[in-house]
Image: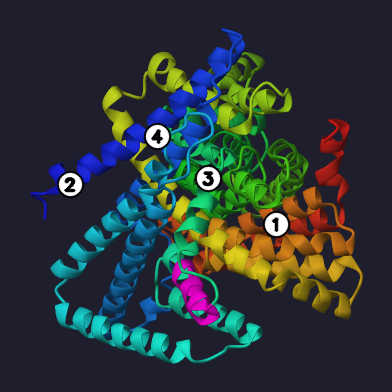
Amino acid sequence: MSQDRPNQIQFLEWTAALLLIAVAFIVALEVVCRYLLNASLPWSEEISRYLFIWGNFLGAGVALKRRAHISVDSLVTRLSESARQRLEGAVGVLVFGFALLLLYYGTMSLSASIGQYSITMGFSLAWVFIAVPVGGLLLAWFQGRAMIVRQARGSTWIAAVTIAVLVAAFMVIGKGVTVPPGTLVLALVVALIVLIAINTPIAVAVGLACVVYLLLKHDIPLVVFPHRIVGGMDSFLLLAIPLFILAGDLMNTGGITERLVTFARALVGHIRGSLGMSTVIGEYFFSGISGSSVADVSAMGSLLIPSMKRAGYRPETAMSIVASSSAMGMLVPPCIPMVVLASLTNLSVAALFIAGFLPAACMALLLLVLIYIQARREGVPRDTRQSALDLLRSFRRAILPLLTPVIILGGILGGVVTPTEAAVLGVIYALVLGMLVYREIRPRDLVPILVNTASLTGMVMLLVGTASLLSWIFAAEGIPLLLANWMLALSTHPAPFLLLTIFVFLVFGAVLEGLPALIILAPIFFPVVSRFGLDPLHYGTVIIGALGIGLFLPPFGVGFFIACGLGQVNVEAATRAYMPYLLMLLVGILIVAFVPWLALVIPRLMNF
C-alpha cells in the first residue's frame, strides 16, 4: 500500500490543493481588477464556484483516505472487539455503496447536463457534473482498497452479502407498497439514527437515509440525489469556508497565537488568576482569526495548558479554562458555522458576525469572574504588574495579528468586499505575516497546510451537499410547519421554543459536532422563528452560541475530548472540574437568549 501512495494519493492531494489555490487566486484577482484596474471579471464567480465543486469531491476522497470524515463512535467503542470488526465491515460496505450511488447517478446526471451551458463562459455544464462520478469513483476506490486490506475480510464479505440481500428485498417489496407520508419521514429518521449510531460517516449516513426515503417515495427519480448534492455545494458564499480554514491554519503555523496570548497576559497579569484570564482574553482575540473552535482549543490548549500547570493550576482546571473559553469563542467572528448558517437561512454574514461580539463578551466576563473566584480560593499566585513599556512592547508584537479581524470585518462591513473575498484577504495577510514578517512559515510547510484544508473542506462540503437533500425533503414534507404547530399548541410564548432550541442544539452539537448538527437542524427550526415573533438574527446568534457550548459538552463533545487529551486528564476528573465553567456558559447562553439587545444592538446601530 505504501508503494502506490506517491503515485495515487499525492497526485490527488496536490490536485485538490491546486484547485484551492486556483479558487483563492481567482477571487483575489477579481478584487484587484475591481479596485486597481476599475474593471470586473464577469466569469470569476462562476469559474471559482465550479472549481470549488471539483475541489470538494476530490477533497472528500482525500478525507476518506485520511479517515477524516466525521462520525459518532460513542456506541461502537462500548462493543467487543469482534463486534466492532463486524460493524466496521458493514460500515465499509455502506460507504462503498454510497460511492457507487454517486458514481452511477452522477453519470446519469452528467448525460442530462450535456445540453446545459454556463452563463458567462458558455461551456457545457457536463464539465462541472463530471465531478460527481469522479468523486464517487475515488470514494469507491479508496474504500474498496481499505476493505481488501482489512484483516477481517470474512466479516466484510458477510456484511456485503447481508446488506445486498436486504437492499434487494427492500426494493422489491417497496415497489408494490404505498407508504404514508408520515411513515416515509419516520423511515428516513430511523435510518439516519441507525446509520449514525453504527459509526457511519455522517455525510454518508445522511445521503443513504435520503436514498431510503426516495426509494419508498416512488415518484421522485434518484437522479435528484447528485443534483441536490451539487446544488448544496454551488454557492459563492460557501467558498469562504475553505479560505477561513486556510487562513486559520496559516495563523496557527505562523506564530500568531503566542503573540496574542502574551499581549493578553500583559493586560491582566497583575490580577490573581491572570494566566487563566489571559486564556479567555487570548481566545477572544484568536477566535476572530481562526474561525474554528476546534482549531482554537488545539492552538490555545497546546500553548497554555502546560503554562497553567507550571503556574500552579490543577491540570483539570487548566483544561476546563481552555475548553470553556473555546466554547465561548464560537460567537466571535469570523466563524465558519456563521457562514454556513447564513447560506442556509439567507441571513447576512456581516450581520451575524457583528451580532456575536457582545454575547461572546458576556460569556467571557462570566468566565473571568469564575476564574478570579477560584484563583483566590485555591491561592493561585499572581504575576507582577507589567510596566507601561512592557505592555507597549507586547502590544507592538500583537498589533499585526490583531489587525486580521479588522481587515476581514472592516472589508465586509464597509461594503468593500464580500465575505468570500474578505476570507481571501485574510489568507493573503496570514501568508505575509507568516512568511515575510515573522518568517515562521517555510515554503515546504504550505503543501501540508493546503492539503489539510482541502481534506477538511471536502468532508464539510460533502456533508453540506447531502444535508441540502435532507433539508429539501423536510421542507417538502412540511416538517417545519409541524414543529411550529406542535410548539404553538404547547405555548405561544417564545420562551419554551428558545429553551427547546438551546437544549436540542446543545445535545446534537455534542453528539454530531457543530456543523453537522447545524446543517441538519437549522432548516427545521428556522422557518418556525417568525411564528414566535423572534428576530432571525438574534435566533441565529442563540443557535451558534448553543453549538459552541455543545461542542465542549461532557462527556460526548469532540472539543471536550481534545481539551482532555491536551491536559492529559481523564474524562471523569475533567467533567467534575468543568461543571462550574459549563454552568457559567449556560447562564451566558440564557442571557443571550432572553436579552435580545445583546445580539441586536450593534447590527441595528450599523443599520443591518
> Label 1: which residue?
543
Compared to 64, does 214 lie above or below? below
Decide: marks 1, 2 in contact (CB < 8 A)? no
CA separation in Å, label 1 and label 4 = 30 Å
Task: Tell me if 155 is positioned left or right of 471 in this view.
Answer: left
Compared to 178, does 510 lie above or below? above
* Marks 3 and 1, the one that precedes in the sequence: 3
**Residue 270, picture quadrant:** top right
Q: Residue 20 carries which label?
A: 4
> Label 2: which residue?
8
CA separation in Å, label 1 and label 2 = 41 Å
Q: What stretch is highlighted in magenta?
A: 206-218
Q: Which amino acid does label 3 sit on?
A: Asp
> Label 3: which residue?
234
Look at the numbered disc 3 and give the secondary structure of its residue. loop
Q: Is residue 54 in view?
A: yes
Q: What residue type is labelled 1?
A: Ile
